[in-house]
Amino acid sequence: MKNIFSILKFTLFMLVLLAIIYPMAIFGIAQLAPNKGKGETVTVNGKVVGYQKIGQKFDKSNYFWGRPSAVDYNAAGSAGSNKGPSNADYLALVQKRIDTFLIVHPYLKKEEIPSDMVTASGSGLDPNISPQGALIQVKRVAEARKLSEEKVKALVESKINVPTVMGTSTVNVLELNIALDELK
């Protein structure tokens, strides 16, 4: 009976700690973050069209495409595929993505496709692609929108985010596509 009472006290303590105190502490910390932890929304004409740090699915030829998503861009279930580079299923999936990319971009060779255009990120929700990943799509997007390639390429180059200290340059796909919609 003495052990049962000790176990019940410990269970109650852990319940209060993990179900009340910890969530309240995290909520308090989130209040110090930009937008009070609710995410950095992107608005166009007063309407929220997405989030700054969460990728979205773009699959029409008149838009730039982002990285593939292992979770089909479902932010509630962020995850990678957990399949290694020697996994046969994973290799088949990447080959299928390459084949699809080449069908839509017949002017490219397989070697010209950057890896970020055919592999999902660890979270499955990466909002950014490499500048090379954006630049190889310029011809397709320009043709679909009946714009000059030079104009679309200049837009891509203006949207390249260069890190201030270290890291790699990126292009936010949502911001690029919003700017593309505003391009005449």
Image (cartoon, helix red, strand yellow):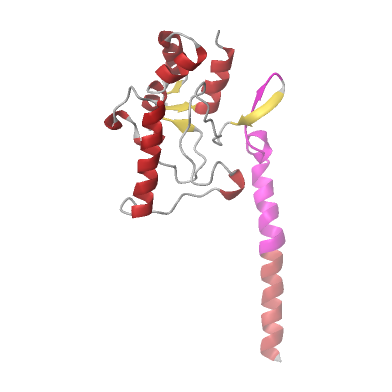
Please check the rendered image and state whether residue 23 is part of the magenta-colored stretch, yes or no: yes
Q: Name the main secondary structure of what is drawn in magenta.
A: helix
Residue 162 in picture, x, y percent from top left: 41, 24
Count of numbered badges drawn on the protein: 0
Residue at image location 38% in from the left, 53% down from the top = 89
Front in this rendered view, residue 184 or 121 = 184
Q: Can residue 66 be seen?
A: yes
The answer to whether residue 119 is above or below residue 101 is below
The quadrant the C terminus occupies is: top right
Residue at image location 46% in from the left, 39% down from the top = 68
For residue 137, what is the image quadrant?
A: top left
The answer to whether residue 49 is above or below residue 8 is above
Identity of the residue furthest to the bottom in this view: 1
Residue 9 in picture, x, y percent from top left: 71, 78
Front in this rendered view, residue 5 or 19 = 19
Please check the rendered image and state whether residue 132 is part of the magenta-colored stretch, yes or no: no
Front in this rendered view, residue 53 or 9 = 53
Could you tell whether 43 is left or right of 70 in the image? Answer: right
Residue 127 in picture, x, y percent from top left: 51, 34
Q: Which residues are magenta?
A: 18-45
For residue 167, what is the image quadrant?
A: top left
The answer to whether residue 111 is above or below residue 24 is above
Q: Can residue 168 be seen?
A: no
Residue 179 in picture, x, y percent from top left: 55, 17
